[in-house]
Image: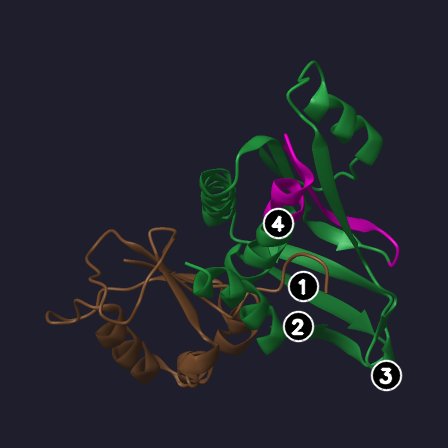
Chain colours: A green, B brown
Amino acid sequence: MIRVQEEDFDVGKELADLRAGNTAIGGIALFVGTVRGEGGEATIGAMTLEHYPAMTERELERIEAEANERWPLEASLVIHRIGRLEPGAQIVLVITASAHRQAAFEACEFLMDWLKTKAPFWKREETPDGERWVEARASDDEAAARWSQED
Amino acid sequence: MRILYLASLRTKAGTASEEVNPPPGIDTVGALIDWLRTQGPGHAAALADLAVVRVAVNQDYAKPDATVCAGDEIAFFPPVTGGAR
């Protein structure tokens, strides 16, 4: 399941909901991304996450479907927040559940790598010098490309 | 067709969206970009460096040879920066 929302999420509740009643699950991997208060040499006050609403959910669904094709997942969840977020705030949650840990670990990392390079979200940081758009990093593309090379 | 400029490209273009009617023959993403660049300094700036421009036609990623036609929604945006860093 995927969700894009302004409000915060409760990791414990999401985890409980995901595994409720499913005793085929033997391993769960969970990733939470948070807002850092430092970026290079600048101190960041907060950031605003924008997205392309018509495209975001479609891309996230595609990425999640791809993970489910590659690994035998019992359940998966991606939540991505939008709007203004203060340092320390949760931005993104990915949970993957499978019979065994390896599929859960790999699918969780795959989902994060791909959503960082495919899902149309952009960050604008507030710094003492004003607002600035965060630029994509080549290392993100490289992280995502790992999964293509393995085909 | 409807053109969207998102995130930093909106800042560069000076507009978030516009309706355009390109002349006949402008039927691919690449041709549309070439034509849009002639439509004003903001457009030229936003589309100057295609290494940092991504394109979606009707909400799907598209390459320069993808076809475009009247009624399409074409979005230009920089490489995405979601998730955690």
Q: Tell me if residue A68 comes above or below residue A108 in the rendering.
A: above
Q: CA distance from mark 4 to mark 3?
A: 33 Å
Q: Which one is closest to the eye, mark 4 or mark 3?
A: 4
Tell me the number on the disc at residue A106: 4
Q: Which one is closest to the eye, mark 3 or mark 2?
A: 3
Give the residues drawn in magenta, as a range: A87-107
Q: Position of residue B84 (x, y in %)?
A: 72, 59
Q: Callout 4: helix, strand or loop? A: helix
Same chain, labels 3 and 2: yes
Q: Residue at x 40, y 80 (%)?
A: B50
Queried whether the magenta region covers residue B13, the answer comes back as: no
| Mark earlier in primary sequence (3, 2) | 3
Q: What chain does mark 3 sit on?
A: A
Q: CA distance from mark 4 to mark 1?
A: 26 Å
Q: Residues within 10 Å of mark 2 (few under 14, many from 20)?
A: some
| Mark earlier in primary sequence (4, 1) | 4
For the N terminus of chain B, give its image quadrant: bottom left
Q: Along the line of sight, which residue is nearer the eye, B36 or A141?
A: A141
Q: Amino acid at mark 3?
A: Glu
Q: Badge 1 is on which residue?
A: A123
Q: Amino acid at mark 2?
A: Trp
Q: What chain does mark 1 sit on?
A: A
Q: What chain does mark 4 sit on?
A: A
Give the side of residue B66 with respect to residue B3, left or right. Answer: left
Seen as rendered, the residue at the extreme top is A21
Q: Position of residue A64 (x, y in %)?
A: 52, 41
| Mark earlier in primary sequence (4, 3) | 3
